[in-house]
Amino acid sequence: MKKLFTLIRVLKPKFLRYLLIGVMSAFLAVFLFITSIYMGAWGKLPSSEELANFQYQQASEVFSADSVLIGKYYLNDRQPIPFDDIPDKVLQALIAIEDERFYEHTGIDYKSLFRVGLKTILMGDTSSGGGSTITQQLAKNLYPRKERTKTNLVVNKFKEMLIAKRLESLFTKEQILAHYLNTVSFGDNTFGIESAALKFFNTRTKNLSYTQAATLVGMLKATYGYNPRIFPDKSLTRRNVVLMALQRNGFIDKNQLKEFMNTKLLLDYREFDYNAGLAPYFREEVRKQLIKWTKQENEKGHNLNIYTSGLKIYTTLNYKMQKLAEEVMVKHMTGLQQSFEKSYGTDAPWLKNKNLINKIVKRSEVFRKLKKQGIEESQILDSLRNNTRKITFSSWAGDFEREASTIDSIKYYAKILNTGTMSMDPKTGAVFTWIGGVNFKHFKYDHISQSKRQVGSTFKPIVYTAALENGIAPCTYFSAQEIAYKNLEGWSPSNSGKKNETYLNYSMEQGLSNSVNTIAVKVLEKTGIENVLEQAKKMGIDEKLPRLPSLALGTGEIKMTEMAKAYTSYLNDGKTIEPFLIKSIANQNDSILVRFKSKMSKKSAFSEENGQIMIEMMKATINSGTASRIRDTYKLKNDVAGKTGTTQNNKDAWFVALTPKLIHLTWVGLDNHEIGFKSTSLGQGANAALPLFALWYQKLNQDKAFNKITRAKFTKPNATVQAALDCEPIKRDGFFKRLFKNPNKKKEKKFKN
């Protein structure tokens, strides 16, 4: 024992010396390590000036005319909000679960650090937490960790501590909380409490309940693992942990805790997805216009970016009208697609016509890419035909998956009917609804702003307007007899309907309302092609149109937006106005940067009297003509004028509706011009396109909010107009002329123009 004490007395001074040296060396090493981080040896630290002036990357928001958020443009989905818009319940939940001593420390919680060091490092207790304060987490949000090695983890921790100290010296506690809640990630590329509140609960942060606030704050520990949409049970458990922390810290009492913990987790999930949501084609067109505007502004010295500048875009779109329009589109196009496929059966061209299939395949992007690589055409076709994989197909009944080749996929989508439909205010040009296609995810091509299709008989009102402007009276009669024009290689326009009615002579009103092709050509012949082209130009159509008699039948290819502009003239005393989508753009502080409005043309395209005559003619189209389904089938009693249109071989179906306060245009067809409807009864404008207006207007009639539109009345035509239209709609040839006339024999003559 004496030897042992002697040994201890001998070793003790050395042990203390070594221990002291070791401790001092460790402290020196730590000091030098921290100094090296501070001096930038491990990467430059942000200066106080940089921290004081940091800017959020902020998503731009798109609003409907009735102030509903309909979409966002972003790299990171973030909507920063001021501290005053963050309710106490959110702040309390955050502090209770993440940093109980937030108001006591100055960026670093040394008690938490000691706890972490003692329990986690020495005792191996991983449940003790990470020890980072909210300020340190803000530092991490502002300067995310790039490397995940153990050395870098230690470096990053010290960096965040140093940045946290600087942040605490620059900002108040309230500012730090606001910055943190505006920068923290909630997963799925969603940043900040406002974006999270909108995504998961479809509400603003200031309107969150305690349970909703606890759910969102609870996600911060693990944004994927506690995502309430993906893992509702885990999220509910975590929410309750946050609620207990709130009670433990005195923010809520026991009764509230019991009530909140018994509350079900109810989401109102809204994903602001580029491909999904309301009005995706409209939002894409707004995006294109916004990019063009920001480019012009940046050339003037501004620094605007639609994805990061937090712009607020206020549009003309009516949320309720658009929602109803999309519901109607789905209902009508689902039934029409079924009828379309059934009409062809097993002999469908997309199944049997090999030449057509090859033509469509060769137009595909995948074929063109392989062709550019120098691969033989036959090899490409074999590869696209024989190599199969699991492919997800979209249908009105829902998506489904099956083993298929690329050509199988191309053939499947070749049969899909598409549409373009829009409505607007004819007085201001403000667009109310905009549906550019049936499925934005699969069909990005916008049939309103991009597509040029033959407009069929919807062009006839322009022909008849030109006739009136050139002195042809509305009670002028034209024979419905078919004519083979010798100087046009025997071209002979025909009419749908009974052949034995060719002896009839129609007034202009009757000819237009029943869309008689032979009469439209004769009206154009008498008016003159150049006069009709000039009239179209006056009415806002800038597309190059064919200088041919077939112009009367709508063979010109025109964008829907131009047709809409032309038809506005009938409701504006001959003056046209362009459709527009954006009313104003504001910055992130809601200060207006620019306002937009459409300008009406200065000159009238036709006289007021002729405009009234045309409205009366198009009212006859609705009341007794080709669009009489509006009255007979859909029982609409509103004041409506309009025109149906069907192109050759039933490839395009059109309908234009005019009401005193609204214009509505619809096109239905296939993206592949080679395929049309099997029959006119199925593919005519009255059957394929008209229902998209009629069903929608039925819904508007049921909502009092739209009474101003639906109950509006056309101005009663003056006495001169009534007198000009006061004639028999049809005159028949004499008895003997009809008796000896062969209705199937075509008269031959030269087209005079």
Image: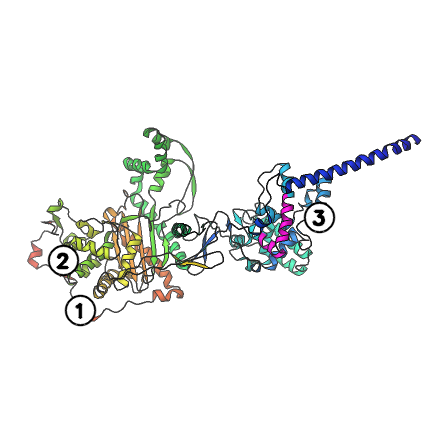
* Residue 152 or residue 129, whichever sits in front: 152
Residue segment shown in magenta? 159-179
Whether 173 is among the magenta residues is: yes
Counting other residues with Cα less than 10 Å from the Cα at mark 2, is it few (<14), some (14-19), or many (20 or more)? Answer: many
Helix, strand or loop under label 2: strand
Evaluate whether residue 671 shows in this view.
yes
Residue depicted at 17% across the width and 50% down the height = 549
The amino acid type found where label 1 is placed reads: Ala
The amino acid type found where label 3 is placed reads: Tyr
Q: Nearer the viewer, mark 1 or mark 3?
A: 3
Q: Disc 1 to disc 3, how far (Cα)?
A: 95 Å
Indicate which disc, 1 or 3, sits on the residue closer to the N terminus: 3
* Residue 299 or residue 244, whichever sits in front: 299
Using the image, tell me which numbered label, if any, was put on residue 723.
Answer: 1
The residue identified by callout 3 is 110
Image quadrant in which you'd find residue 371: top left
* Residue 190 or residue 107, whichever sits in front: 107
Residue depicted at 61% across the width and 59% down the height = 88
Residue depicted at 43% across the width and 42% down the height = 400
> Does 49 sit left or right of 627 as displayed?
right
Counting other residues with Cα less than 10 Å from the Cα at mark 3, is it few (<14), some (14-19), or many (20 or more)? Answer: some
Query: What x and y, as percent, mark residue 521?
Result: 16, 53
Query: What x and y, as percent, mark residue 13?
Result: 85, 35
> Does 537 sit left or right of 25 as displayed?
left
Chief secondary structure of the magenta span? helix
Image vertical order of residue 359 relative to residue 171, above or below:
above
Image vertical order of residue 44 relative to residue 192, above or below:
above
Q: Quadrant of the N terminus?
A: top right
> Does 753 sit left or right of 91 as displayed?
left
Q: Disc 2 to disc 3, how far (Cα)?
A: 97 Å
